[in-house]
Amino acid sequence: MINFNKNSVFDLKPIEISEVRNEIQTFLIEGEELLCAFKTFRDQVVFTNKRIISIDVQGITGKRKSFSTLPYSTIQFFEIQTQGFMEIVPDSELFIQYANGFTAQFEFKGNVDICQIGKIISTYVL
């Protein structure tokens, strides 16, 4: 389950942009583009050129979904942690601190270019 109220999202695995749920299109504003996407079992996190959007699929049938956004415009700072050497299950992390004190932490599993995610955030924050 993805819930930014709990500050953490774990076990994110990369997916192709084409695999992002179609409902996301209704939330995108003019000029907003999907840059990269990740999933847990049913949930997804999408990085755009404006914000981070989470899709939390709820219930047994998955018909109910909760959408949350974290805009880049209010990021105070962020930190990335790269994968370690010869880890059995490689993972990397992203920690974001917002101006209002809210923090979000993401753990990515597998072969994720965490530096590219850092570059995306830097490009739209600075």
Image (cartoon, helix red, strand yellow):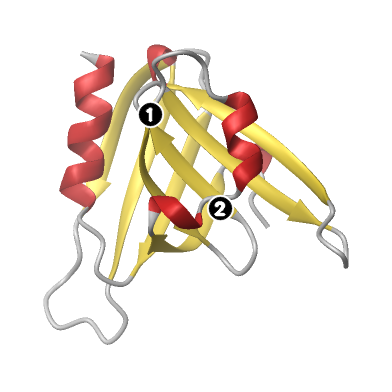
Q: Is residue 69 above or below residue 108?
A: above
Q: Is residue 99 above or below residue 117?
A: above
Q: Amino acid at mark 1?
A: Glu
Residue found farthest to the left: 85
The image shows residue 27 at horizontal and vertical percentages of 61, 25
* Residue beneath the point at 27% across and 19% down: 124
The image shows residue 116 at horizontal and vertical percentages of 18, 44
Q: Quadrant of the N terminus?
A: bottom right
Label 2, residues with CA under 10 Å away: few <14, some 14-19, many ≥20: many
Q: Is residue 54 above or below residue 122?
A: below
Q: Is residue 86 left or right of residue 60?
A: left
Q: Is residue 76 above or below residue 92?
A: above
Q: CA distance from mark 1 to mark 2?
A: 16 Å
- Tell us which disc is closer to us: 1 or 2: 1
Q: Which residue is mark 1?
A: 33
The image shows residue 113 at horizontal and vertical percentages of 20, 55
* Residue beneath the point at 68% across and 36% down: 67
**Residue 44 bears which disc, if any?**
2
